[in-house]
Amino acid sequence: TRDLSEQIKEVTKESHVRAENTELMLSFQRGQVTLPQYKLLLCSLYEIYRALEEEMDRNSNHPAVAPIYFPAELARIKSIEKDLEYFYGPDWREKIVVPAATQRYSHRLRQIGKENPEFLVAHAYTRYLGDLSGGQVLGRIAQKSMGLKSGEGLSFFAFPGVSSPNLFKQLYRSRMNSVELTAEERNGVLEEAVRAFEFNIQVFDGLQKMLSVAGNEQRQSSTDSKAVHGKTLQIPGTF
Ligand code: HEM
């Protein structure tokens, strides 16, 4: 059989193209990302990485997780918290707003953490290798687009524990390939990777919808957006 790293890249190729072509990712690539877009994206990344990293931590000794468990190099949650505090202030936790798609994504992450930890590799691959690839360019573009100073509010994009993203990606792929999976489990992982991309696309689309609602009908609540701590929140008109 071929390497998991090759297969996963191949089966998600088309999804990657669709992710790159979401409205939100196009704004990034055109250097047109706005502060409201970026702030709202950070809120969703917070929910996503909290679920992903909690489940990775809990399953760090699982044979399918241990080889790809790199908290020192990859963990994003502290960086995201720092960025959220920078943009929203000390009470940022009360200001987190996410689309329903983000809740579905984090729910799925927690579910597989409990039921199929071997699928976590698909989600870790999708986010972390993306962050180490296109994400590096997007970070620099974002800084310019929003006129931010020397990385302020952009910790999410910085991987101080990874000196060469390309070498690290090679190491990560070899670790992925060392995971022993039955044929059935491997198919499950490949399917889950396509699903992981799909979740990301739906989150990006959900964010754009929230932004257009907030921009066009100031301060009206949206059925597609909820506060993560249970209460339904109105989308703030000002970011
Ligand atoms: C890899 C660009 C969005 C996940 C890459 C690579 C580039 C890139 C240039 C390196 C390709 C290679 O090494 O052959 C972009 C751009 C994006 C974007 C410009 C949007 C503006 C995304 C998104 C995700 C993602 C939204 C998933 C959430 C990945 C993954 C890889 C990757 C997992 C590693 C592929 C592999 O080597 O197996 N991306 N990307 N990307 N990207 Fe993206």
Image (cartoon, rainbow, N blue to C red):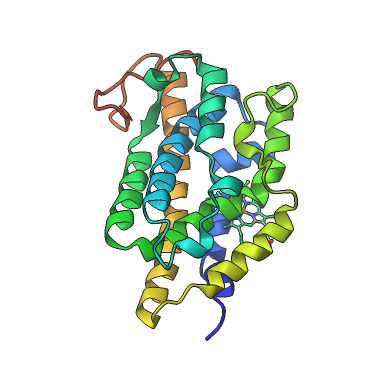
| Mark count | 0
At horizontal 37% and vertical 14% (from top left) the residue drawn is 219
Question: Does residue 31 show up?
Answer: no
- Residue 225: give x, y in percent of width and height: 33, 30
At horizontal 69% and vertical 44% (from top left) the residue drawn is 136
For residue 222, which quarter of the picture?
Answer: top left
- Residue 144: give x, y in percent of width and height: 74, 28
Residue 152, above or below 206? above
Question: Does residue 167 show up?
Answer: yes
View extreme (front): residue: 61
For residue 170, which quarter of the picture?
Answer: bottom right
At horizontal 37% and vertical 74% (from top left) the residue drawn is 185
At horizontal 38% and vertical 44% (from top left) the residue drawn is 51
The residue closer to the viewer here, 78 or 185, is 78
Residue 77, above or below 200? above
Ligand 1 lies in which image quarter? bottom right
For residue 171, which quarter of the picture?
Answer: bottom right
- Residue 44: give x, y in percent of width and height: 44, 35
- Residue 118: give x, y in percent of width and height: 38, 65
Residue 149, above or below 9? above
Indicate left or right for 206 with 230 as reference. Answer: right
View extreme (bottom): residue: 1
The residue closer to the viewer here, 146 or 122, is 122
Indicate left or right for 129 with 69 as reference. Answer: right
Residue 92, above or below 78? above
